[in-house]
Amino acid sequence: MNESPYWSLDQAVREPPRGVLARLAAGMWRQTSRSRICPPTLRLDGQLALVTGGNAGIGLGICRGLLRRGADVVLLSRNESKAAEACARLRAESEAWGDASGTVDAVRVDLGDLAAVREGARRLASQLRDRRADLLVCNAGVWPLRHSTSSQGHELAFATNVLGHFALLRHTLATTLTDAARIVMLTGDIYVLAGDCGPDYPYQTPLGGMLAYCRSKLGNLWLAQQLQERHPQLHVVSVHPGVVASGLGGTGGALGTWIRRRTLIDADRGAQSSLYAAVEPRVPRGSYLHNTFGRVDLARADAARDSARAARLWAQCESLCEGFD
């Protein structure tokens, strides 16, 4: 009997294959047919959701899915014109969905600059007034093609994907999120290629940019772990959305484009696991959802479960955010 394509908590919790190559290969094997879909019956009517990087790629797919399930959505994006275009597109689409869809708006937040995160969080709180958000999806991410640094001098993948989200969480927990909000943290199984995460990773080649991205995805898992431990009233879920044709890392030319079309899933399919993490209230706190493995139980030796290094990263992020409250 074929397994249902829809996400379900009845599916067994799995431990991923041991070994880096075995795990990455197993996750991508027949990905287009094995990637789970969020059931359309789950809804978020009347809830308010914030989505970083919601103007394109997986983020746009997440926003679309949340709107169709009745949530009001605010896109948090560094590019105001692209965010406005995304909002207009989503509003046009929602006209066909009828009254069951929510509303959509945008606020500029540049995760690569701690001062801009602070200002964006202030604009968000002002725009929401007394309304509190029920959900924050930490989706935005960059894959540098060359070494570059943030306004504060930190390696850009770390600054945007890890530190920027950490700073945004600090601000929104204080001003705009409900006490029991759900936090969905997007990561990527590619983190298994990394062994650490920090602000000052030097590199000179495109491969270094890939490794910087891998390190940041490990950092996202460590942030999620610490966030759940330090704020047990929150509902934190980490998600591997799949290997998605989102444009991160470049196309790799004609050959790369050919391979991507045949092995990667599109952004709307890549949004499905994040949507399930956002809308299914019974997903256990601290879970890790994988688009093809399902709900996974990471081995004790997995780097993502290193509580000591996760705590050190959290303390380091706190130190780096000093002066930007």
Image (cartoon, rainbow, N blue to C red):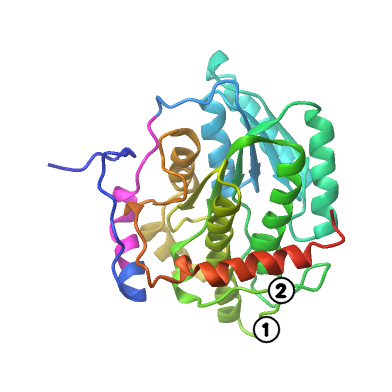
Q: What percent of the width, then of the height, locates residue 45?
A: 55, 21
Is 288 left or right of 102, judged from the image as shown? left
Q: What percent of the width, then of the height, locates residue 203?
A: 65, 84
Mark on residue 155?
2
- In the image, 308 versus 101, the foreground residue is 308
What residue range appears in magenta?
A: 25-39
Marks 1 and 2, the one that precedes in the sequence = 2
User: Residue sitting at 56 percent across and 21 percent down?
Assistant: 101
Is 231 rendered above or below residue 305? above
- In the image, 247 versus 237, the foreground residue is 237
- In the image, 39 versus 286, the foreground residue is 286
> Mark 1 highlights which residue?
202
Is 236 rendered above or below residue 86? below
Q: Does the stretch in magenta take in 74?
A: no
Q: Does the stretch in magenta take in 36?
A: yes
- Quadrant containing the N terminus in the rendered view: top left
Is 185 rendered above or below residue 156? above
Is 51 left or right of 45, judged from the image as shown? right
| Amino acid beneath label 2 | Glu
Outermost residue on the left side: it is 1
The quadrant holding residue 2 is: top left
Q: Are marks 1 and 2 in contact (CB under 8 Å)?
A: yes
Q: What percent of the width, then of the height, locates residue 196?
A: 55, 76
Q: Secondary structure at mark 2?
A: loop
Q: Is residue 292 visible?
A: no
The Cα–Cα distance between marks 1 and 2, rounded to whole angstroms, is 8 Å
Label 1 crowd bin: few (<14), some (14–19), many (20+), radius 10 Å: few
User: Residue sitting at 57 percent across and 42 percent down?
Assistant: 234
Label 2 crowd bin: few (<14), some (14–19), many (20+), radius 10 Å: many
Q: Is residue 197 visible?
A: yes
Outermost residue on the top side: it is 99
